[in-house]
Image (cartoon, grey):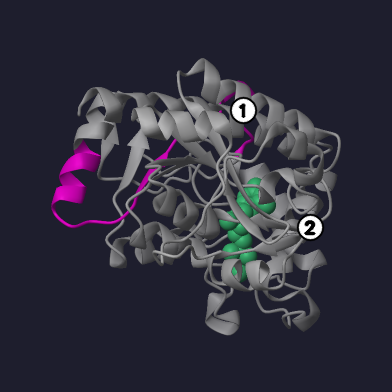
Amino acid sequence: MVNQSGALALRLNDSVASALKAGSAVVALESTIFSNLGLPAPYNSEALARVMAAVVSGGAVPALTAVLDGEIWCGVTESTHDTICGPTQKVAYRDVASAVGHKATYGATTVSASVAIAAAAGVDVFATGGIGGVHRNWEQSLDVSADLGAIAKHQVITVCAGAKSFLDLPATLERLETLSVPVVGWRTDEFPAFYATSSGLPLNAVVHSATELAEIAQLHWSLGGGGLLVVNPVPEEHAIDLAELDEWTVEALRREGLAPGAQPNVELAGPSVTPRVLAGLVDLSGGRTLQANLALAESNAEVGASIAVALRSGD
Ligand code: PSU
Ligand code: MN
């Protein structure tokens, strides 16, 4: 996968290749949320279609990342969408090289892998649902998502609805501060809690427009900064009350042996935690977290497209 000049060989579909060549707006997307590890079928295909359409209607080209047949893609072709929505292995940043080496049929990229691939392709905006972060009980498990380090490292703007609500949100914000990642509220001054519009945790940066955000990003980059995190709350009509969400979360974590004080379930440690807890929440909420997940992913794609467009017009 490394060409003769030593540069990484990335596969791009035609529309992404032309957009990058023309210097027009592109928004990278991850594949894990659309795979069997993210949303259950048939909602994953619906989510993929809605997210792609939202990027396009926002005036940008979607670039869905994945490892397919041992090749790294930034903008898979539409013919692979059924594969994308199917069974897979989770490929974080550290796993990309070995997935290529082992010629993985389908490796679903997480946030950490996607921002790295986006940066390598020259794409400066990435949209997802919720990022990984510091897990509750981190004192015992040391489980901190690689998403945070990758966001800090690459000059890519990540648009999300905050970090997944079953994480330790105050600790996640502390970690982002240590990593010097600006956390910018999209028309909000509180850190959103994924399915809930607000966590009660204050933010010190708020923007009301894509132009404003693009200016902050350019300045951060000219100071040698890495990624920025834009946090866009779930659309109001799908928002779930924080207290109710917290009850379900405690129960979903308990089911996985992850409640505070419980012995961690070693079998479930690491990358399989996120999919299992998300599935537990869908069950406990009677599907409401699923609808919220679709709506917030679509909304983040729209915001991402507007930022990608604003970054181009400021050039
Ligand atoms: N948020 C979701 N569903 C997901 C994820 C996040 O609603 O499937 C995935 C993303 O790909 C994210 C990853 O990068 O979980 C983080 O996993 P971990 O906590 O193992 O780093
Ligand atoms: Mn983890």
Q: What secondary structure is found at the residue carrying circle 2? A: loop
Asked whether, in this view, residue 187 is left or right of residue 115, the answer is left
Q: 10 Å neighbourhood of mark 2: few (<14), some, or many (≥20)?
A: some
Sequence-wise, the earlier of marks 1 and 2 is 1
Q: Which mark is residue 52?
A: 1
Where residue 261 sits in the image (x, y, percent)?
67, 79
Q: Amino acid at mark 1?
A: Met
Query: Quarter holding the C terminus?
Result: top left
Q: Which residue is mark 2?
A: 88
- Percent from the top left, x then y, of residue 164? 58, 52
Q: Magenta span covers which residues?
A: 216-241
Q: Secondary structure at mark 1?
A: helix
**Tag count:** 2
At a point 56% along the width and 64% down the height, the residue shown is 1
Q: Residue at x 48, y 35 (%)?
A: 17
- Image spot of residue 93 (x, y percent): 53, 65
- In which image quadrant can residue 297 be found? top right
In the image: residue 306, left or right of residue 16: left
Q: Residue at x 30, y 25 (%)?
A: 310
Measured in 3D between alpha carbons, the distance from the residue under mark 1 to the one under mark 2, in whole angstroms, is: 20 Å
Residue type highlighted by circle 2: Thr
Ligand 1 has an atom within 8 Å of the beta carbon of the residue at disc 2: no
Can residue 15 be seen here? The reply is: yes
Q: Position of residue 129 (x, y in %)?
A: 58, 42
Whether residue 136 is visible here, answered yes or no, is no
Disc 1 Cβ-to-ligand 1 distance below 8 Å: no
**Residue 189 to residue 73: above or below:** above
- Does the magenta segment cover residue 103? no
Task: Decide: is 263 above or below 282.
Answer: below
